[in-house]
Image (tube, grey):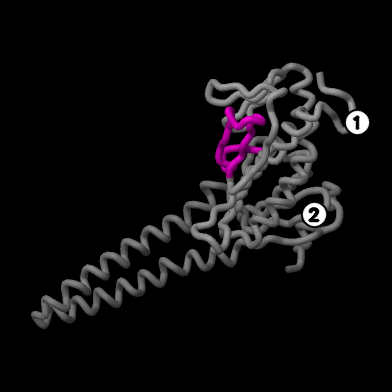
Amino acid sequence: MPFPSPVLEQAARRELGEPIRAFDARGARRRALARPVLSAAAAAAFAALAVAALSSDRLLAGAPAALSALVCLYYADWTLRRAAGAPRRIGTPRVLYLFVHGLVVDEHRRLATYHWNELTAVTVSGVQSAEGASTRWRVTVTAADGREITLGDGTPDAGVLGEIVSAEVTTRAVPRLMAAIEAREHVRLGPFTLGPHGIDKDGERLPWPSVAEAGIDNGVVYARDADGLVEMTALAARVPNAVAFVEVCRRVRDGRHDDGDLVH
């Protein structure tokens, strides 16, 4: 889709570089709003059938129709509340515009602009209801001002966008995390705490010299020792900057920075 002039102008003012792609969630929102309308129509049809049947003393036909009308009406109310309330509650953008150096987010006709270095954390989780089924992605991006941008089923290719944003945020988060560890500070990433002596979780510690492997598998973030006696795990949906967590574990295990200096 073409990038609107206000978006391009705001991106130019913030020097976001060339436009790449727009991720438009409005189609999914329209579909979500169509469900309660159709359910309400079905409820009206069943109610009319129930009234006609009951007025003719056909109880066996009227009772199921009346019950169906109530079910459809309940579903219409539930889907309407969900469609109308969820975007405001979780900060889901109408359209997200991707640029070389950041994002422009259209949140209900208000534009917000973010450079990559203004995004501090990203949480990406994908769930498959069954083997071979499509993955349902949920991506939450946290800005330095504390604002959260949430992308889900309503955003086309949310997984692709999540990977792009995660790569950009990880590139900037890893040096910060490494510097904090070297300064003997502790940094919390969801249930994990990274510190100068190792990884802590739920009162258990995995010392850095014992870390043999860290990674993300099937929506689970893990770190374990060589013998498999100590293994720390958490759902990826609960670990902001999970990719950065894995990379920091690898670098500390290898004892090196980007410039090759040893970590002491």
| Residue at 63% over, 53% down | 107
The residue that label 2 is drawn on is 99
- Taking depth in this image into account, of 13 and 180 the one nearest to the observer is 180
Name the residue rendered at 80%, 60% in the picture.
20
Residue ID for mark 1: 259
Q: Amino acid at mark 2?
A: Phe
Place of residue 133 in the rendered image (x, y in percent of width and height, measured from the top left) = 54, 63
How far is the residue under mark 1 from the one under mark 2? 29 Å
**Pointer 1 with pointer 2, Cβ within 8 A:** no
Q: Is residue 229 above or below residue 79?
A: above
Question: Which residue is at 74% across, 47% downward?
Answer: 113
Instruction: Residue 233: say if magenta.
Output: yes
Residue at the extreme left of the image, as rendered = 57
Closer to the observer: label 1 or label 2? 1
Element type at marker 2? strand
Residue type at mark 1 is Asp
Query: Where is 172 relative to 129, above or below?
Result: above
Q: What range of the chain is rendered magenta?
A: 220-241
